[in-house]
């Protein structure tokens, strides 16, 4: 697409102010590349993230005052202009997806400006909707399991040493039927974990078992703490990856073996460790995903090979963005919520 064919303005969603969670539909000029890695992308689909409308207030150190408050950092689209940094091979017409860093404007608009280091090419077998549903969830899962966690990614490709290592590790995942949790279940199972314990509602049991869960804890019937106490020797796990925080994360400490690893993307685990619990983790920490295209490229290879897939809860027209955010806020989504931006999605 030549630059002369670009419109002067575009439709965009905008958070009304840093202090409010109201989102409005408006028009704005197209963004202009200003960084060597900036890539102008025509957005076809995008996905909101739980809690993102509160980031400016809750994490002011991560959201600079100059950020244009366009929500939805996950995008799938077509490259319009290639980056000035020629160490990257993206070209006009490439189908790409990514997670845009939270410090910059998101993708709920016709055109966005991801950085080349954030981008990966979309596998041929992935639709715009499924591609938009992938980046945040899959990247968070990949980094939780293989970078911050204790499983070895080489196990996915059949490396014998890695699979022998992974076969000794039991993993417990909270929020297992959700957007991130469903990816963690898939990746841990694919890498050859000894067992994958999925904490979710009974409604999600069939889905998570299909993704590779070996055990399911229905939190509506029993807490993770009580489940673990019923048979500690058989049920303790080596790695906990938590999406939920609060009492759910507190209960995970009981399920963790002595010297295990406990990770949360919601809350620092030590902040909710039960008082008087005489159990130590070798590592206990909260982490925030990095929007790395190189990780997304590895995930794309797995998708292309048919080994993993995103989970989509629902798809919404751009005009129905308020309904999409309401569905997200309900807390009942089973997978990612996707908003179609263009007619091609």
Image (tube, rainbow, N blue to C red):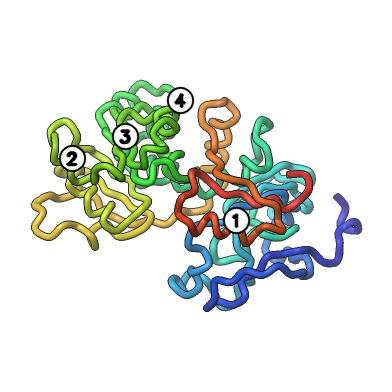
Give the mark nearest the N terminus, 1 or 2: 2
The residue lying at 20 percent from left, 43 percent from top is: 255
**Label 2 belongs to which residue?**
228
Distance in Å between CA atoms under marks 4 and 1: 37 Å
Distance in Å between CA atoms under marks 2 and 3: 12 Å
Is disc 3 in contact with disc 1, using a CB cutoff of under 8 Å? Answer: no
- The mark closer to the camera, 3 or 4, is 3
Give the mark nearest the N terminus, 2 or 3: 3
Instruction: Assign a secondary structure to mark 4.
Output: helix
Residue 106 visible at all: yes
**Label 1 belongs to which residue?**
324
- Measured as percent of width and height from the top left, residue 106 is found at 62, 61
- The mark closer to the camera, 4 or 1, is 1
Distance in Å between CA atoms under marks 1 and 2: 36 Å
Distance in Å between CA atoms under marks 3 and 1: 29 Å
Give the mark nearest the N terminus, 3 or 4: 4
The residue lying at 39 percent from left, 27 percent from top is: 155
Give the mark nearest the N terminus, 4 or 1: 4
The quarter holding residue 176 reads top left
Crowding at dot 1, Cα within 10 Å, few <14 / some 14-19 / many 20+, comes out as many
**Label 3 belongs to which residue?**
216
Q: Is residue 196 left or right of residue 39?
A: left
């Amino acid at each position: 697409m030549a630059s002369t064919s670009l419109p002067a303005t575009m439709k965009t969603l905008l958070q009304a102010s840093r202090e409010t969670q109201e989102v409005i539909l408006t028009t704005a000029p197209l963004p202009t590349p200003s960084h060597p890695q900036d890539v102008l992308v025509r957005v076809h689909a995008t996905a909101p993230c739980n809690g993102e409308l509160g980031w400016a207030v809750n994490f002011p150190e991560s959201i600079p005052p100059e950020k244009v408050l366009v929500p939805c950092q996950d995008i799938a689209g077509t490259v319009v202009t290639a980056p000035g940094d020629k160490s990257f091979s993206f070209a006009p017409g490439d189908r790409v997806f990514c997670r845009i860093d939270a410090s910059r404007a998101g993708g709920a608009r016709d055109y966005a400006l991801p950085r080349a280091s954030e981008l990966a090419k979309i596998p041929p077998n992935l639709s715009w909707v499924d591609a938009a549903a992938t980046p945040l969830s899959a990247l968070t899962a990949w980094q939780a399991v293989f970078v911050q966690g204790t499983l070895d990614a080489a196990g996915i490709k059949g490396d014998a040493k890695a699979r022998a290592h992974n076969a000794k590790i039991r993993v417990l995942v909270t929020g297992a039927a959700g957007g991130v949790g469903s990816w963690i279940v898939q990746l841990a199972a694919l890498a050859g974990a000894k067992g994958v314990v999925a904490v979710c509602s009974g409604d999600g049991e069939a889905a998570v078992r299909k993704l590779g869960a070996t055990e399911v804890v229905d939190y509506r019937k029993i807490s993770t703490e009580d489940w673990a106490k019923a048979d500690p020797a058989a049920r303790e796990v080596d790695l906990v990856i938590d999406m939920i925080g609060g009492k759910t994360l507190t209960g995970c400490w009981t399920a963790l073996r002595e010297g295990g690893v406990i990770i949360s993307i919601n809350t620092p685990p030590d902040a909710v460790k039960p008082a008087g619990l005489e159990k130590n983790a070798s590592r206990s920490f909260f982490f925030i995903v990095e929007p790395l295209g190189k990780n997304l490229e590895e995930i794309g290879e797995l998708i292309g090979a048919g080994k993993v897939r995103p989970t989509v809860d629902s798809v919404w027209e751009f005009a129905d963005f308020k309904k999409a955010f309401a569905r997200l806020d309900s807390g009942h989504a089973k997978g990612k919520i996707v908003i179609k931006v263009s007619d091609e999605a």
